[in-house]
Image: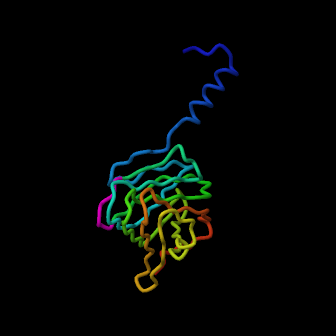
Amino acid sequence: MKCQSSAFCLLLLTLASCSREVSPQQSSGDKPSSTPNEGVVSIEARISRGTRFILYANDVWSAPQRLPVAGGEWKAYQFKIPQGLKSLRFDPTELSGADVGIRSIKFEYPGQAPRWMPLTELPKWLKYHSTVDFDASSNQARIRTTDSDMYIMSTVEVNSYANGQPK
């Protein structure tokens, strides 16, 4: 298609760049590649049951990222995140009665030291069809689903998190 005017061409280019979907499906073992404007959040979790882990970043409900669940096994679930990350929503399973253990949440951006979210933050997140607690003896957060289609969500401030991995 040939553009009739520069304003029309600019509009088409703007629309095309805005419609890009952010990595909706990744293979189970691949670390998503990031661009200078993107990073990666890695969530080390054991999910007892379910088929998919969904993550939403910055309230963009139309572009969820999903990964298959490795039922009952510890796995690092890695998702792309924007440079200006303000909020996250985790939907680690679609099933009621599931148990989700989380050992770490690490944020990595190109050219920056990795940062880890304190797991003591997770019980403060908004919960839907779930409960969340932190076990200091194992240094793990635990999510229990009370109904299907659960989630937890909150604002995040990556730059306030520690550079070193919590002990």
Residue 18 coordinates in the image, percent (x, y): 59, 36
Task: Establish if 147 lies above or below 118.
Answer: above
Question: What color scheme is it?
Answer: rainbow
161 and 121: which one is in front?
121
What secondary structure characterizes most of the magenta part? loop
Residue at far right of view: 7
Q: Is residue 27 left or right of residue 118?
A: left
Task: Establish if 41 lies above or below 15.
Answer: below
Task: Establish if 50 lies above or below 132.
Answer: above
42 and 146: which one is in front?
146
Residue drawn where x is 61% and y is 62% of the image: 155
Residue interval drawn in magenta = 68-74
Instruction: Examine the image and state in which quarter residue 159 appears.
Output: bottom right
Q: Is residue 35 left or right of residue 140?
A: right
Instruction: Examine the image and state in which quarter residue 54 appears.
Output: bottom left
Quadrant (top left, top right, bottom left, bottom right) of the N terminus: top right
Residue 85 coordinates in the image, percent (x, y): 60, 56
Residue 14 coordinates in the image, percent (x, y): 63, 31
